[in-house]
Image (cartoon, rainbow, N blue to C red):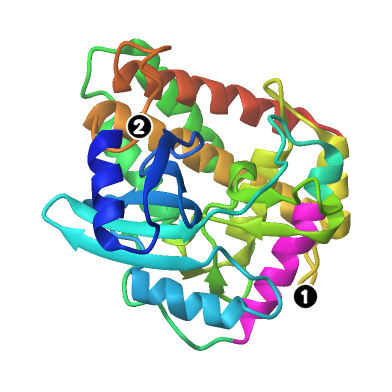
Amino acid sequence: MNTTSIRKEIEDRNFAGRVFSVSPLSGGIVNGTWRVTAEKGEFVFQMIRDDLGGITAEDYLLLSHILRKSAPIPVLIDYWSDKNGERRIFRFIPNDSPSVPSGTHAAIAARHLGKTHEALRGSSWRPSRTIPGFHETDRIFSRLSALTGRSNSGEADRLAETILRESSRLLMPEYPEQLIHGDPKWKNFLFGHEAFPVFARVTIIDWDTLMHGNPLIDLGDFCRSFCFKAGQFDTDAFALACANYWMEGQPDTDTALQATKIVTLELGARYLIDWHEDSYFGWDQRRFASRKESNIAAARKYISYFQSIAECSL
């Protein structure tokens, strides 16, 4: 979708006034996201891929109500759909989020994630729509196994065999299921604007992946993302995250590390599956010639990263 058509759609909705600029926001690898500066303020415009599922706009409004006191999320201003997909407009949140998170960011965000989990734990509400098969780890590994050997890529098969071998030795610890974010990577956390101390304001964004599941999925994915430093596992950031995350039935560091390993392998498997199917992940067209090339590079990166996690000494 080009910026001219985005500008026209927003101006036609009559909530923003004249639109001055539209610029893409980085970080998302599935949905398209743009920052909009307009006469009546700044907004975030998002194009949602209907074919992938994810919570509805109405679900998001209910989620906002649940989290309004303990862990507020971006305000949804407007939403609409047509044959090309769903659009959502959020109030833009000024922030000073880093290009690379520090251990301090990991500690602050872990505390906020724990607070968010506690707020969601008591809710019996279920979203009306979720992403099918998301974080169904056994199904994902089984799908990868079924695809392995069907191509002429020896590297793809070798990477898959490593994932399947290592995953067979791991088991996600059981915890009572509840509502979880589903994708709490560091780019989905906004940290306080310069007008606020960084400890004073943290916001989690991109809730399309909301699901009912094991909260250790979130904790493992959080640690996978926040502890990635130049391809290696940052044990200091991991220790800070574990020390600051809190929920009922507090997991110990061994449990958190096990979850981190599993989620890292799962992500590598998802990239390899998409290497075969060539339909899901977006890719940086300045760095890669195709989605397949991007996917195998990502799988390679996460398998190397998993090995760094497996070798760490806590």
- Give the left or right position of residue 168, taking residue 101 as reference: left
Q: Residue at image x 46%, y 80%? A: 62
Amino acid type, callout 1: Gly
Q: Quadrant of the N terminus?
A: top left
In-image side of 267 versus 4 (left or right): right
- Image disc number at residue 154: none
**Residue 20 location (% of width, % of height):** 42, 40
Point out the tag, 1 or 2, that comes first from the N-terminus: 1
Q: Residues within 10 Å of mark 2 (few under 14, many from 20)?
A: some
Looking at the image, residue 32 lies above or below residue 87: above
Image coordinates of residue 200 in percent, x first then y, are 83, 60
For mark 2, give the secondary structure. loop
Please tell me in which quadrant of the rendered image residue 134 appears.
bottom left
Q: How far is mark 1 from mark 2, CA to CA?
A: 37 Å
What's the residue type where badge 2 is placed?
Answer: Gly
Q: Which residue is mark 2?
A: 282
**Residues shaded magenta:** 108-122
Where's residue 312, x and y in %? Answer: 80, 31
Q: Which residue is mark 1?
A: 249
Rendered position, 309 above or below 189:
above
Answer with left or right where residue 76 lies relative to residue 199.
left
